[in-house]
Amino acid sequence: MRAALGSVCAVAPLDASSTLPTQRSLIAGERVASTSGECFETVHPGNNSVICQVEQAGEAEVDAAVVSARAGFEEWSSMTAMDRSRILRRAVQIIRDRNDELAALDTLDAGRPIAETSSVDVPTGADVIEFYAGIAPSLHGETLDFPGGFARMRREPLGVCAGIGAWNYPIQIAMWKSGLALACGNAMIFKPAEVTPISALALADIYLEAGVPPGVFNVVQGDARVGRMLVAHPGIAKVSLTGEVTTGQAVMAGAAATLKKVTLELGGKSPIVVFDDADIESARNASLTNNFFSTGQVCSNGTRVFVQRGVYEAFLDGLAERVAGLRVGDPFDPETVIGPLVSREHHTKVMSYMELARASGARHIVGGDLPSDPSLTSGNYVTPAVFADCDDDMGFVTDEVFGPLMAVLPFDDETEVIARANATPYGLSGAVFSRDLARANRVANAIEAGSVWINDYGTLPESVPFGGYKHSGIGRENGYHSIEHYTQVKMIYTNLGGVDRYM
């Protein structure tokens, strides 16, 4: 079926056969033709059929987006915080009203199961915008009094911010970045991943409909060249990236030339530590969910599961049957749990790690195969896999696979497991399962990661910060702490008396 031209949000119900018109960048509230003369395809991962062509933005479009964003910033930042809050709240309501349409766009483009995009991605993204809309009017500076005067500290927006999204949570990441930036009074130019370019345009349409002035949220389409142009542009004050470590390193290096602020949310190889006094069923549930949700394409997943020897076999007992029972299939089927990987290229990478695991000497528990269903052969499917008795130095244990591959490792004591959990350049997330809360808190304190859960994994209310240690990133997203990354403090001192002569 073909969607109507115009807003990609107002379309007929989507499925795996849906196609869309050619997509363009959105600048100053209008879709603009690209001067680059280049297009690229975006495909549905479930069958690798082409969804649409996308015009690659050139330098002219990036420059126009910066000019547009600067004009939008002047208007947006001069509004009262309450006015900005009202507009963002209207956007939240439109997002919630169109939840199913937005979810279907990301299922079509990213291949993530509709059960996830409709119940997690869109609702939690809306929650983040609502959170920041709520606190926008409360953002304020402070005053310090002195004998001869007083100092005012004003919290001011940065200006034009660039957001560079990842392909695993296309619209959620766009909402996370834009909700925070706009609530603080900034404008944003957003570049979605070229693999998943569609839903950011729908979000831009919603912002315009809600009353966000044109130019405040622009979308520029394209590959890494567009990202490099944004990072280098002198008219941009900040770059926020979600992506791989190597991309983060390149962004940080590029931003240094103009001393841009950066927020980097990068990769992870997170540990789940299960002690012998843990609720094993809860630990098993958390481990499965946080290895196989989104077909394992989640940066914060706990892909190294350390289990104390006293409960090691009990933890593994029945795991093969449970994992084998996870439904692999069409992501538009509400019963599907494991959808396709995002691209053929990524599928090849993940399958290479499955082969590496098989050859490693680790115990193969289940999965890691192409599914037998002939209807899935044209898509990027793989069955979820578990390998046990893993060593810390096995390649699939050390590397971020970004696919449905769980490694289970035995350990003996607390000191040992802390050292092994931290023996990684990553530091995004982690978890501890134990009924001994003193021990659980000791270990949680010792894990080098930005988010650590005790007897849980992955719970991220919009009011808590998310980000990493070490190679997993710089800065935080969500929560009040992130305001610091999208505002700057100006000190204004007022002298209430005369100025003495010193010279």
Image: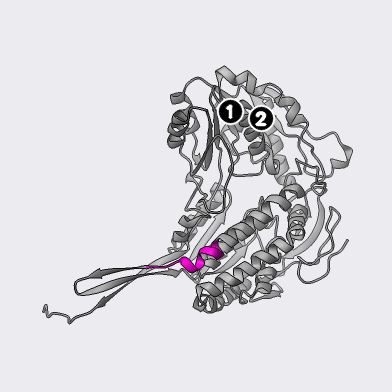
Question: Quick one: label 1, few (<14), some, or many (20+) residues within 10 Å?
Answer: some
Judge whether residue 224 can be spotted in this image: no
Does the segment drawn in magenta span residue 476?
no
Between the C-alphas of marks 1 and 2, the distance is 9 Å
Residue extending furthest toward the bottom: 498
Could you tell me what secondary structure mostly forms the magenta stretch?
Answer: helix
Q: At numbered mark 2, what does the secondary structure look like: helix, strand or loop?
A: helix
Judge whether residue 134 can be spotted in this image: yes
Answer yes or no: do the residues labelled 1 and 2 have beta carbons within 8 Å?
Answer: yes
Residue type (three-letter) at the residue carrying disc 2: Leu
Residue at mark 2: 356
Question: In which image quadrant can residue 261 be found?
Answer: bottom left
Q: In this rendering, would 345 be left or right of 68?
A: right
Answer above or below: position of 309 versus 496: above
Residue at mark 1: 394
Q: In this rendering, would 188 be left or right of 153?
A: right
Q: What stretch is highlighted in magenta?
A: 132-141
